[in-house]
Structures are given as C-alpha cells and as structure tokens.
Amino acid sequence: MAKVIGFLSAFMALAAGLIAGTDPITNLERAGIAAFVGWAAGTIWQALMVSTSVVFSAKTENMEESGDNTGGEKQEAA
C-alpha cells in the first residue's frame, strides 16, 4: 500500500509540474521527493493501523476468554 501512495504522490507532482511548465529536471526531483514522502507516510500509516488492530484484537480475545461480554461495563443484578 505504501508503494501505491508513493506512486500516486509522484504522479501528482509530475502532473502539477507539467501543468505549471517547470523545468524537467526540477520536475523529476520534485516527483522523487514526493514519492519518498508518500512512501514514508504510507509505511508509517500502515504500521500504526496494524499495531492498533493487533491491540484491539488482543483486547477482544481477552474479553471472550474471560466471558466478559458486557463491553467493559459492569451490570448490576436485578
């Protein structure tokens, strides 16, 4: 997924440079920087989303094992 985000950001930088009529070398440099930033941001985003889903699934598994289906709320007996 990070590669796709990097590719899309590079493509957008190239398109913007072509529309603006910038120098081709400058345009390629900007696209390279955009690809790296997009790749890095995609990698960080993916790492954060995977780690939060692992934590959430671990909490859910612990609740199922303990038989706590109340979602963390205590219910009083009627």
Image (spheres, rainbow, N blue to C red):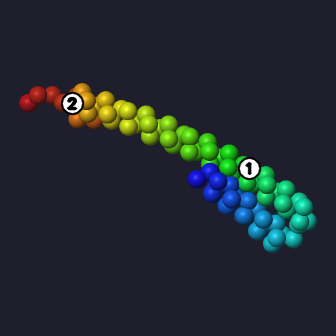
Answer yes or no: do the residues labelled 2 and 1 have beta carbons within 8 Å? no
* Crowd class of label 1 (few under 14; some 14 to 19; many from 20; radius 10 Å): some
Whole-percent x and y of residue 27?
85, 62
Left or right: where does residue 71 sit relative to residue 29? left
The answer to whether residue 73 is seen in the rendering is no
Left or right: where does residue 29 sit relative to residue 41? right
Q: Residue 67 carries which label?
A: 2
Residue at x 76% of width, y 62% of height: 13
Residue at x 85% of width, y 56% of height: 29
Q: How many marks?
A: 2
Mark 2 to mark 1 CA distance (whole Å)? 47 Å
Label 1 residue SS:
helix
Residue 44 in the image: above or below residue 64: below
Give the residue type that dot 1 points to.
Answer: Phe
Left or right: where does residue 33 sit relative to residue 65? right
The answer to whether residue 60 is seen in the rendering is yes
| Residue sticking out furthest to the left | 78
Residue at x 54% of width, y 40% of height: 48
Whole-percent x and y of residue 59?
36, 32
Whole-percent x and y of residue 76?
15, 28
Label 2 residue SS:
loop
Image quadrant containing the C terminus: top left
Q: Quadrant of residue 65 in the image?
A: top left
Residue at x 38% of width, y 33% of height: 58
The tag earlier along the polypeptide, 2 or 1, is 1
Give the residue type that dot 2 points to.
Answer: Gly
* Crowd class of label 2 (few under 14; some 14 to 19; many from 20; radius 10 Å): few
Q: Which mark is residue 13?
A: none
The residue labelled by disc 1 is 36
Q: Quadrant of residue 23 in the image?
A: bottom right
